[in-house]
Amino acid sequence: MANNMISFNEHGELLNYWVKKQYQNEFVIYFDQHLDFKKISEENLKILKSYSEKNQNMNELNRDVPFREYETYPYGLDNFLYAAKELNIIDHLIWVYPNNDYTINDLQKVLITNVSLIAGFKEEVLSSFAINEYSVELSVNHLKIEITNLKYLSHIKLNKTPLIDIDLDFFYNSNKQQLHLVKEFKEYFLSLGKAWKDDPTMTYSITSGFLPEKYSYLGEQIADFFEMDIVHHSKLRTESNSITKISYLLNNNSTYLTSEIIEEVWEKVLVFYSGTGLGVKSLLFSRIGNLELAIQYYDLAKQNNVNYFWSAYNIGLIYMNQKRYALASHWFLLAEGNLTDSIQTHSLILRSICELKQGNFSESLALGIKCADEIGIRAEPYLIIALSCKELGLIREYKKNYVLYKTFKSDGLSGVKC
C-alpha cells in the first residue's frame, strides 16, 4: 500500500532509489517535460553496473547539469532512464507529454525528435515503431517507450500495475510562464483510483532551472491530493547554489549572462573542477558570443585532458551562423567524439552540412551515409546524401535518397517502417 510521496531535487537521484528498491523490469507511467533517455558510454555503464552489484550509493555517480564530461559523475538527470534500462529496472515506459492539444501525429513527432539523436538503434526503432489509437510506441535499447498525453491516457488499457513518477516541470508551461494541467492530472488519477505499485515518486527540478522556485508549493499540493506525506530523499551538495546558477544560465539561455557573471561562477565553483571547469567556462563564453575566450578556455581544458564537446559544438554553431563552414566543420569534428551524447550526434549532421556547403561532395556523401547508418530515423541524412549524389552525378542514388528524405519529412517513421 502506497502511503508516502517520495521526492527528489533532481530526476537523476531517482536511480539510486530504484536500485535500493530492487525493482526489476518495471512498467512506469512518467509525467515529464523531457524524455531523460540519452545514451551512456560502455565505460560509464561498467561503473554504474559495478556500483549496483555492490549495492553502493548511485548518487555518488550522479553528475550536475553543466558537467557532461566530468568522469567522476558518469550519469545525470538527462540519461538516468537509459541507466535504469541497462540495470534492468524498467522495460516499459509510458511518457505522458504535457500538451493536451497535441494529436497522435504531433506526439509521434515529439517522440521521434527525442530518440532520433541516439546513435546505433536505427533498425530496432524502425522495426518496433507503431501508431496506436491513443499513443505512439517504439523500442530503443530494448526499452519500450510509449508517448501519450493526459487527453488520451485514460483510454490506454494498463496490462500491468505501474510505478508512478512525476517531474513537477510537467506542470510548468515555460512559454506562458505559468502552471497548467494540474486539474487534468488530478482528474486522471481520480478515474484510475489507487491502481499503482508502491509509493509514487516526485522530482522538483528547481535546481536545474526547469521549474521556477516560486512554484515549489506544487509538491505539497500534489502530495495532499494523493493524501500522502512527502518523504524527501535528496541531499544537497555544498556547492548547490552555484550549481543552480550555472544550470539556470545553461538551460534558460539567460539574456543577462555577462563576462562578470561568468567570472563570478568561475571563482565560486568552476575553479575547483579543473579541466571540466575550464570547459564550462568556455561554454559560457560561447553563449555570449565571445569566440576568443571560448576558444582560449576550450584549449586550456584540453591541456587538462578534457575535450569539452558541448563548448566545441557551440563554437561550431557560431562559425556556421557566420557561414565560415571550414572552421565550423573543424569544431564539429572536435565535438563528435564517440557519438554518445546527442550533441555529438548532431555535430556529425552539422559537419556533413558544412562539407556540403563547401562543395566537398565526396566527404559530405561519406558523412551523410554515416549519419544514415547511425541515426537514420531523421530526414537530414537522406537530404545530405541526395544533394551530394546529385553534385557527383549519381542520379539514381540522388532520386532514391530524395524520396526517403521527403518520406521522413512528411510522414515520419510511419512512411518508412521496415
Image: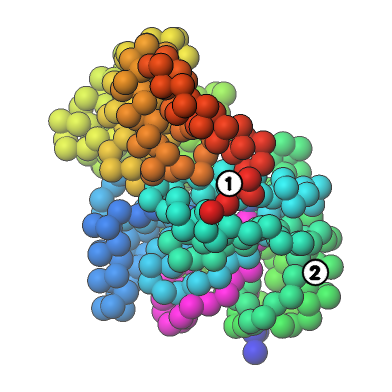
Q: Earlier in the sequence, mark 1 or mark 2?
A: 2
Residue 116 is left or right of residue 154, and the answer is left
CA neighbours of label 1 inside 10 A, class few (<14), some (14 to 19), many (20+):
few
The front one of 347 and 47 is: 347
As drawn, the label of residue 47 is none
Residue 173, horizontal then vertical, whole percent: 72, 44
Q: Which residues are magenta?
A: 5-32
Mark 1 touching mark 2, by CB under 8 A?
A: no
Residue 6 drawn in magenta: yes
Residue 61, horizontal then vertical, whole percent: 32, 60
- Residue 296 against residue 91 in the figure, above or below: above
Q: Quadrant of the N terminus?
A: bottom right
Q: Nearer the viewer, mark 1 or mark 2?
A: 1
What's the residue type where badge 1 is placed?
A: Val
The front one of 7 and 387 is: 387
Q: Secondary structure at mark 2?
A: loop
> Which residue is found at the position 45% from the left and 10% from the top?
322
Tell me the residue that label 1 is attached to: 416
